Image (tube, rainbow, N blue to C red):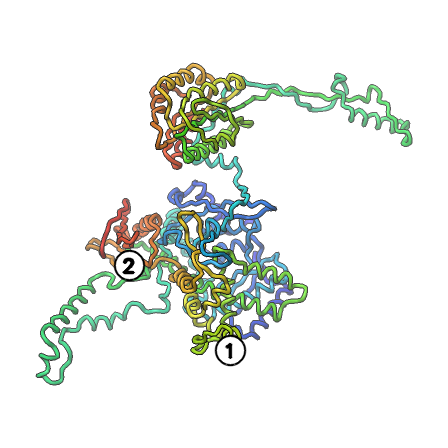
Amino acid sequence: MPKSLTPRLQDLKKEIEGYARAFGLDFFETVFEVLSTDELNMVAAYGGFPTRYPHWRWGMEFEQLSKSSEYGLSKIYELVINNDPCFAYLLEANAEVDQKLVMAHVYGHNDFFKNNFAFKYTNRKMVDEMANHATRIRRWIDKIGVEKVEDYVDTCLSLENLIDQHAPHIKRNPDPRVEKEQVNVAPTGIKVDKEYMRPYMNPAEFLEKQKRQVEDEKKASKKFPERPQRDVLAFLLEHAPLEDWEHEILSIVREEAYYFAPQGQTKIMNEGWASYWHSTIMTTRALKDHEIVDYADHHSGTMATQQGKLNPYKLGIELFRDVEERWNKGRFGKEWDECDDLRARRAWDKNLGGGREKIFEVRKHYNDITFIDAFLTPEFALEQKLFTFNFNDKKNTWEIATREFKKVKAKLLQQLTNFGQPVIDVVDANWENKGELILSHRHDGMDLDPGYAKETLRNLQQLWRRPVGIVTRVEGKSLLMRHDGTTFSEKKVEL
Amino acid sequence: MALRIDQDHSRFKQIVRGKIKQNLKKYVQQGEMLGKKGKDFISIPVPFIDVPHFKHGSRQGGVGQGDGEPGDAIGQGQPQPGDGSGKAGEGEGQHVLEVDVSLEELAQILAEELQLPNIEHKGTEKIVTTRIKYTGINTVGPQALRHFKRTYREALKRSIAMGTYNPDFPVIVPIREDVRYRTYKLENLPETNAVIIYMMDVSGSMGDEQKEIVRIESFWLDTWLRHQYKGLETRYVIHDAVAREVDRETFFHTRESGGTMISSAYKLCRDIIKADYPSSSWNIYPFHFSDGDNWSADDTRQCIEILKSDMLPAVNQFAYGQVESPYGSGQFIKDLREQLGDSEKVALSEIADKDGIYGSIKDFLGKGR
């Protein structure tokens, strides 16, 4: 059972919170709870929410977490939920210095949740919402049986990533009213003041062309959906022949996916920001002399890098520090960019002192993609020893491909774009006038995994009931993969 | 303490074991985590269920951090970007021990998976060894079973009680009543000894891939039979034109060349059985693997002769697995099937590739002999 803080921990909380506030962090009220290792593993397996609907995949997460902590491979230090109030969990067995570190880290996250733009539209009462979801799904389980509901949840999970990552921020579909007016425009040609000018301003070919254009548009509007829709789950909710319970569960899965999406978009920034603050608070304020060695040990453990894997904590904290230093010393702008003299660049210091202010601004207005795009510099990549790696088929190993800055940056951005997930739209829900659903994969140099695509199509078909397909490119050729519920087929198409 | 997640956890385990939700079975994958225990690296199996998503094909590369020149390897099995399972990279030359799943458990999983029947031990009642078991202490008995320590203790007790014990001169003289004897019982133990005799064709046509198949298959056969019999013995025979007995290591790693005379192996196998494993007290399992290419029809006839007259009466089951190879004619299994296909004691199986191992194990062990 979660325990509330001991008086000692309460004092620590008050102390750390004071430091955080003094540094200008702006956060939700934070509720710390103390858990045993098993309980912490459990809450982590539930994605931070102790009250989620029953599903085997939490059990799978739990198995991994508990095995890895049992064998001493990894240990969860902190767990914090984007909610108001913000919930955070402390491990009962941790030493005092660790509890301080975690608290400082948590205030960093908390500030990020509250202020970063990507979280602006997330539900801040998600703890309650998740409990609601669980209750609703349990009710359906009671009504129609666990097997049926669980199988359906599995199917939905298979499509979970087909959402529009940027949906909360962009209005993609035009306002229906405005659209209607546009469609009804008659081809009258350009407006003319003097009647005799008409044949010159609007020659017959021109009018003809305009007429065709309007007709084309009308024709296009008969297409369904009118334009590609990125939020496939929303499309299914609206148009697939789902039963009540199916509709409800799919909308729950979609809502939870959207809730977690910003955390995926800001992993590097969020962890970097929290690490920056635990480091700053601990080393300048909270650490006692005798705690320094333990703190250093744990901090460096968190920041450790492996060759083949980017550590978001490390990359994030270093990049924030780099930005702070650059803005402190005035290493930005036209003059800096045009300076070729290496010695001058190294000694560059205009004593502007705007670094702290700058990183606060950055944590508000950027996500991982824009953060990397705007602030990753060649010097930084060199210093952090970044490289790209590829698979060498001949040697059957992964190997370092290049350290060239442009390529490293491009690869990193590509990896972050859409979460590293393929970009997929609904393009046609009435393909060949047979009610078949066609998705389109926007191919950006990487093929889909055909085995996974096949199984996923099977799941999609179960929701759509009619045959479904996806248009993609395999080895440079346009291909339609199609599943009609019983058989899978592939054919070459041009769409 | 019971946790709320226990229900989800056990459900997950049941899916992995294939007890419920068969439709997810195909998505179960065997991941592993690497840990360090003392000097050794241990591999901790973590099964996970990979629900299909639209995702990019594997091996797309990524961005890493650290030392090294372009072209340097960065260790095998690097995690993919966006790969949630977080497998750690495994360096070469590390000593990896498998933990967590015992062979016993493996055998059970295997049995559940293939629905293998338990083996009926041959002559369980008939084959009996007697063992002497010491069960207690008595005041009478033969001198040979005198229990020195207990006797001394009795004598010491007595002399202290009588007041004759002198700590400075601790001499104890036992009298007749002090002496204690061991008592015993005879126990009848049913003996179930079993031996596997592996035979493998190592002629030129058996490549590394074929041997790999034999290796994997014999591991599973071993596991299952060990589960059924305590004290399983294994013997290894390799042959090309002549046969010889070898140790396990050699068995799997030798590559000879030259012709194939299967009868040579069967003769040697027959001799081993005759010399060491009287069929009245042993459960005998010869397994033979080859690519089905034999020297001559004449030799094949000889093989069948040996099987019919000497081997089959003595063994529980004779199993022949034919591994597909680009060179073999695959004739041998047809001959066996024609001649011995009716015999209950013969299990024949063709193994096309690694995926065929699964079915082949069932062929071999499905009879419950």
Query: Is residue A475 positioned above or below A14 on the image?
Result: above
Query: Is residue B91 positioned above or below A205 on the image?
Result: above
Query: Is residue A10 positioned above or below B88 on the image?
Result: below
- In the rendered image, residues at marks 2 and 1 fall on the same chain: yes
Residue A119 shows up from this direction: no
Q: What's the mark number on residue A354?
A: 1
Report how far apart the C-alphas of labels 2 and 1 lie in the structure.
Answer: 46 Å
Dividing the picture into quadrants, the one containing residue B310 is top left
The kind of residue on which mark 1 rests is: Gly
Tell me where residue A19 appears, x and y as whole percent: 59, 72
Q: What's the mark number on residue A426?
A: 2
Q: Which chain is mark 1 on? A: A
Is A352 or A55 nearer to us in this picture? A352
Query: Is residue B39 positioned above or below B241 on the image?
Result: below
Residue B64 shows up from this direction: yes
Tell me where residue A423 appears, x and y as whole percent: 34, 59
Q: Which chain is mark 2 on? A: A
The kind of residue on which mark 2 rests is: Val
Q: Residues within 10 Å of mark 1 (few under 14, many from 20)?
A: some
Is A173 or A245 nearer to us in this picture? A173
Instruction: Answer with left or right where residue A52 lies relative to residue A237.
Output: right
Q: Which residue is drawn at 28% across and 59% down?
A: A426
Q: Which of marks 2 and 1 is nearer the N terminus?
A: 1
Tell me where residue A373 appears, x and y as whole percent: 41, 68
Position of the N terminus of chain A, as image quadrant, is: bottom right
Element type at marker 1? Answer: loop
